[in-house]
Image (cartoon, rainbow, N blue to C red):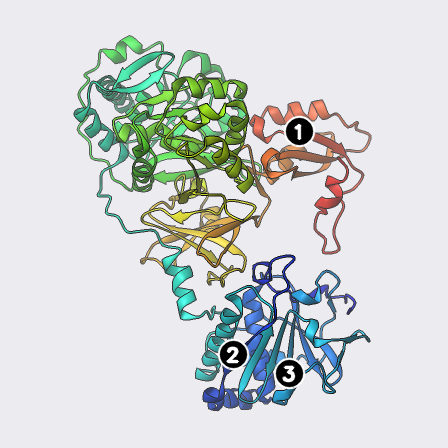
Amino acid sequence: MTPAGASGATVFALPTAWRPAPGSDPAPGTAVVEHADLADGLDALAGICGTDLPTVLLAAHIKVLGMLGEADERCAEVADGAGVRHVAVVRSAATWQELVLRVAKAERPVAGSADEVTYGERALFTAGAEAGGEHGGRDGSAERSGGGGSVERSRYGLRVHAGERRLTFTAALAPPYLARLASMHREVLRAMAADPDGDALAARLDPDERRAVLGDWSTGPRVDRGNGTVVERIEAQAATTPDAIAVKVAGAGTTYRELDERANRIARRLTGLGARPDALVGVCLRRTADLLPALLGVWKSGAGYLPLDPALPAERLRHMIAAAGCELVLTESAHLPALEPPAGGDVVLLDRERESIEALPATPLDRTTDPRSLAYVIYTSGSTGNPKGVMVEHAGLANYLLWTAETYAARGTGGSPVFSSISFDLGMPSLFAPLLTGQPVHLLPDPLDTADLGDELAAGAPYSFIKMTPGHLDLLSYDLTPEEIHSLAGLVIAAGDAFTSELARRWLEFAGPGGTPVATEYGPTEITVGNSGETLAEPPATELIPLGAPIPNTTMYVLTDRLEPVPVGVPGEVYIGGTGVARGYLDRPGLTAERFLPDPYGAPGSCLYRTGDRARWRADGSLEFLGRVDHQVKIRGFRVELGEIQARLREHADVAEAVVIAVGPVRSRSLAAYVIPAEGAPMDATGLRDHLAAALPAYMLPAHFVAIDQVPLTTNGKVDTRVLQGLL
């Protein structure tokens, strides 16, 4: 094998999804791409560049290889009379002319490493007489490698032979990828022949494949949702079923009429204190009878709400209130010491002002809510050390919640339980979808020990639906009996974290025929709770459950960093568009511009949200989740920026440097902090944990603290997480 050179380049490897299944040994297939009809254009391009046709064909091949891999440093393997040389895969050429020139001038091939790539994963390009594509070397046996050894051509997973009239492909690929590969080469050659100065950066996919990944698979159905907001639709439901139970908490029930009237009174109190559209009102309440009237009252006042979980550290709550510019906070006396509202702001203590609020008129305010106004701002973990506020508008929230009402709440009449933090948007459908359909919202005790969750849910079953993290689903699969699982709900939804097929299989097995089905839902906070989902008839063959189909009025693409579509089976980053895309980050214009990009496939003025999630399309149109492209992880369903924890650790006087990583399997992932103590300072794990706990929520606290002398690095200069994991 060719040794690594200074460049650190690695030979190109075929996409994992394109390779045959492990253990299979399929016979190689053959595909042919004729290009004689493009001869004039291709010869002209060769002439402009002062080179020959084989070089143009090699450039076309390198363009395709660039489309099949992510943007790391790779090199193509090219056989010639001297052996096998390595030519850098060029991804940045703007025109075909530039691409061909750069390939033609690659007189000194880059050194490449094949140490981690087997021959079955590699691709070999040859050119010359047509017969050359049918035999190993020029003598029909072998080809000398650039490293001094000899290599049978037949051992390569893909062989591409360039003849004067056609390209011949020989490969043992999973169907239908050989045909896709041939089509991509044909599309590239067609574009090269048409215009030497044409766009060489654009993806060149088969038209049918392009239509699938940018349309059929990635676009949700168009549904007219009208202009009504969620609160207006709940008001209409209250008028239709005024005496039905809307909220159940601690054995007591609140009717729809009582809920609506209480919310109207709170709205009047807030309006009198200056609540208005696009202003934010902080809501710091536990799951009590006041929670839903407070949230609806904020909306009825025209304002948006800022959820403030009383369980969060006081420092974090105060930071969010100040950063959001909250002039109003709704809370109770018990939570007031932790909040410290800004000077000049007002605090409404619902327990102390209960009588005065009840004395206000119960009739609704005269208001008009713009669907583009703020519904809420939720703070998520931020890589710079401070959380960032995501601004969600009423239109996106209505689109999502109406979908959950149709898809989740319609599964029964028992409503839904709420047991997650109000600062965690996973619980949005449980809070509001039942109210859109005349069903009850069940507020479970707060705080609630997870050991008691199964008993609480079983006592209130059957529900229409229950939405939870995969961690909760895993817990329930052991805590509940098969009989309890069978009749628990019309549907359970696992969302907010990686959902394994093994867990889905176990749940469906325990539920039995006709029992509680399970669904998946995917979506970051920035696209309004959820963007895709599906109910599982049976667990898929993948390790993780696919992300599901886009919900109505949304899109979900897998793109390159240039916003070009990637081929089926090739990893890329998930970008989400449509009605649910948030307005951006509150008072963070730079970060907003970085993550919310103009949508090249949407209506003028529309945006795509860059999720940071890696995925790839499967041949059946499902979208397979592959992890993150950055340092963000999910812990118990909560999104965590590791950089925020690291920044807090570095603030401690006893810490010189710190690295935080996620460790353990998906279902029980935890955080580990690796600390280089300051000179002369001891390693005090308890002190460091207390330091973090003063500013960060419990789910962001590392389970492990390890002292290290230096941060281990890979040969590319990145943190070597494998070495760190080995220290536990």
| Residue at (75, 55) in percent of width and height | 715
Q: Marks 2 and 3: CB-CB under 8 Å?
A: no
Whole-percent x, y for residue 226 in the image: 21, 43
Whole-percent x, y for residue 45 in the image: 52, 87
| Residue at (41, 17) in percent of width and height | 459
Q: Which residue is mark 2?
A: 96
> Relative to residue 554, is residue 236 depicted above or below?
above
Q: Helix or strand or loop: what does disc 1 sit on?
A: loop
Picture quadrant of residue 635 = top right
Asked whether 704 or 693 is in front, the reply is 704
C-alpha separation, residue under disc 3 versus residue under disc 1:
58 Å
Q: Is residue 671 left or right of residue 375?
A: right
In the picture, the disc for residue 703 is 1
- Local crowd size for mark 2, using a 10 Å CA cut-off: few (<14), some (14–19), many (≥20): many
In the picture, the disc for residue 134 is 3
Q: Helix or strand or loop: what does disc 2 sit on?
A: helix
3 vs 1, front mark: 3
- Mark sitting earlier along the chain (2/1): 2
Q: Say how many tags the image has.
A: 3
Q: Helix or strand or loop: what does disc 3 sit on?
A: helix
In the picture, the disc for residue 468 is none
2 vs 3, front mark: 3
Asked whether 176 or 561 is in front, the reply is 176
2 vs 1, front mark: 1
> Relative to residue 482, is residue 55 depicted above or below?
below
Label 2 sits on what residue type?
Trp
- Local crowd size for mark 1, using a 10 Å CA cut-off: few (<14), some (14–19), many (≥20): some
